[in-house]
Image (cartoon, coloured by chain):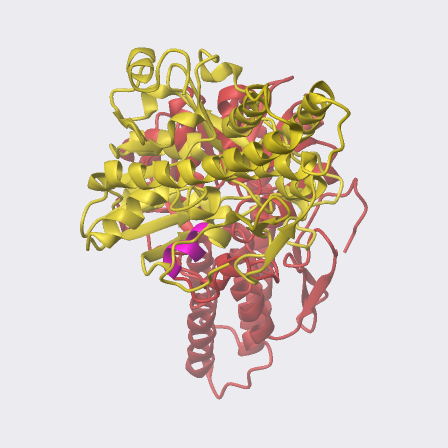
Chain colours: A red, B yellow
Amino acid sequence: MNLANDAPLRPIDWIGGLDGYVDLIDQTLLPVEFKCLECRDVETIHDAICRLAVRGAPAIGVAAAMGVVLGVRWVDAANRDAFLGQVDRVCDYLGGTRPTARNLFWALDRMRNCARSRGDENIGEVRAALLTEARAIRDEDAAMCRAIGDTGQSLIPDGGAVLTHCNAGALATAEYGTALALMYRAHELGKRFTVYVDETRPLLQGSRLTAWELRRAGIDVVLICDNMAGHVMRTRGVDVVVTGADRIAANGDAANKIGTYGVAVLAKAHGIPFHVAAPSTTFDMGIVTGADIPIEERSPDEIRRGFGALTAPEDVPTYCPAFDVTPADLIRSIITERGIIEPVSSRTVADCVGAAGA
Amino acid sequence: MNLANDAPLRPIDWIGGLDGYVDLIDQTLLPVEFKCLECRDVETIHDAICRLAVRGAPAIGVAAAMGVVLGVRWVDAANRDAFLGQVDRVCDYLGGTRPTARNLFWALDRMRNCARSRGDENIGEVRAALLTEARAIRDEDAAMCRAIGDTGQSLIPDGGAVLTHCNAGALATAEYGTALALMYRAHELGKRFTVYVDETRPLLQGSRLTAWELRRAGIDVVLICDNMAGHVMRTRGVDVVVTGADRIAANGDAANKIGTYGVAVLAKAHGIPFHVAAPSTTFDMGIVTGADIPIEERSPDEIRRGFGALTAPEDVPTYCPAFDVTPADLIRSIITERGIIEPVSSRTVADCVGAAGA
């Protein structure tokens, strides 16, 4: 992997041909250690998604697609139906990793459809087609992120201040990011601005990942604890808030990392526009409102001993949702690779994404 | 120190006579280790306040008062003026520990006045009077906290849910606490309820201290990260929010642990009453509005490596305010030992506290 600071950050890639491997940055080690995982079987990808070595809805989608290739490339199926059965089993297995990210299921559906649509080919050709499809998912995601950055960069004010939550950056995607794509493109165009980065408890994607990748690109960062966002908005001036999303319902309600909803409420109270940046693949048009988006709950020890140290009574009950839902009426606009959705409503979402989904 | 669970928690006390010592719980070690510090000189008290071994505005006031006794008890002054000069130097030294807590300066002023008011006595008698005064400050604080609990416990709904931020408990005071006094009293009266406890980054007073002391008393606790408060209010139901305060301006604007302001904004957005519990000594009637309350900034490493582990790029800039100010219009009521201030305004504050301050 190219670690030069002036190279675009590609957190996940397929290296070589069908006998190759998935190369991904182990994000659990950042920012202390920059180390890549070579994944040569689907179990390693499954584990990497579960323990957040790869995270961020688009990157999870890419990882899962490549994981399907790893899971079926050496399968010695008796016939095409048996092979498709194995594809289904691998997709189900990978679909059990995390429940909220829309892109995970979208990517797995695409891999299933890719396999099924190749009815006339032999199994070897289907395997090759699956690798091509997984690589296409990566490349398309990178292109979508660049398009999101181009579309949304005008929202980043020269000389101003932005606030973001969690990591919707290159590390969360194939390249460039979603929310951070706006900042990368604005920076490339010569704008200078400050990004307040919420550390994002419990897993600190803001302090570990966003602060790291924005500084790598030469962008000014001020790291804060999550509970400082309101005080910063009130006393220091924040011009705009931009976050990513993990799944967006047909009415524009957006699930994203826990804490996003609170930031959106604070932004509204301070008259600061709150924007979501996400590719069209993040929309789940089969879900009418955010109330139906499943919210993953994670281990109590992510709160009680998140840094290797015990920071609470060891058996204290916790509530540890990984996501929350920001209702559409708190979202000024959603920036997609197809354009900006503003105002956010069922009609404008359908106009942009299509009633049947991405 | 009595560590039995059914004994009231007294985090700071003077043990013995003038040749005795200050016994205080080292709160930096909780909840992993319950250990007391025996402080026999003013430097140890100064250090304990600076590194938050003792924290919480009322407890800081008690510690500082007792620290004055430690700082002058063996002074061999040539005359009364020289002795008073030493009292002033010790008070100035202790006043430099932390800038925001009102009770620190209030307690030091009381110790200065105590020394000055004893014009006819010899230095030995003044020393004894100072110890009596420091003990009185502790005892009065304990009595105030109990009165706050009695006054405010009716706000805690039987079968309901409360949310609190930071630690305004027994550990923050001489005994019983301020915000938590309401919960202790309600629990003693047989009410059953759940307390959502914000962990309170960066120093985790919520997870380390509040969760620990509420559970010690048998009260149901659910620990959450700070950024989950909005989602909890929206999806789980919170009936009331109660926090403490470190300094309250004459118009009712209240400085408290960073993040309190954000919680107050979220409470308003969800129609949940937000109350502050604080003794009258926390009011600073010389400060007209919260804009004039000095806000302490703490070390970047409290954010970057708060748990012994590096959780951010090691040189990333941070902003680390220890407090924020919640404007009076977000505060439904202030519960004091003298009664409940509601609505909160300059007039109602003056009616309760007195125009000249506590």
Q: Which residue is located at x 35 percent, y 56 percent? A: B221
- The location of residue B52, given as percent across then percent down, is 60, 43
Q: Which residue is located at x 44 percent, y 27 percent? A: B282
The reply to whether residue A119 is in sight is yes
Q: Which residue is located at x 50 percent, y 85 percent? A: A77
Residue B219's quadrant in the figure?
A: bottom left
Instruction: Tell which residue pokes out farthest to the right in this image.
Output: A4
Q: Is B213 included in the stretch rendered in magenta? A: yes
- The location of residue A197, given as percent across then percent down, is 59, 36
Counting every numbered tag in the picture gives 0
Residue B234's quadrant in the figure?
A: top left
- The location of residue A187, given as percent across then percent down, is 68, 27
Q: Which of the pair A294/A228 is nearer the observer?
A: A228
Q: Main secondary structure of the magenta part?
A: helix
Q: Is A186 included in the stretch rendered in magenta? A: no
Classify A23 as above or below B93. below
Please provide the residue range marked out in magenta: B210-216
Q: Which of the pair A160/A245 is nearer the observer?
A: A160
Classify B327 as above or below A301. above
The reply to whether residue A173 is in sight is no
Classify A47 as above or below A109. below
Residue A17's quadrant in the figure?
A: bottom right
Dividing the image into 4 quarters, which one contains the N terminus of chain A? bottom right
- The location of residue B57, given as percent across then percent down, is 50, 34
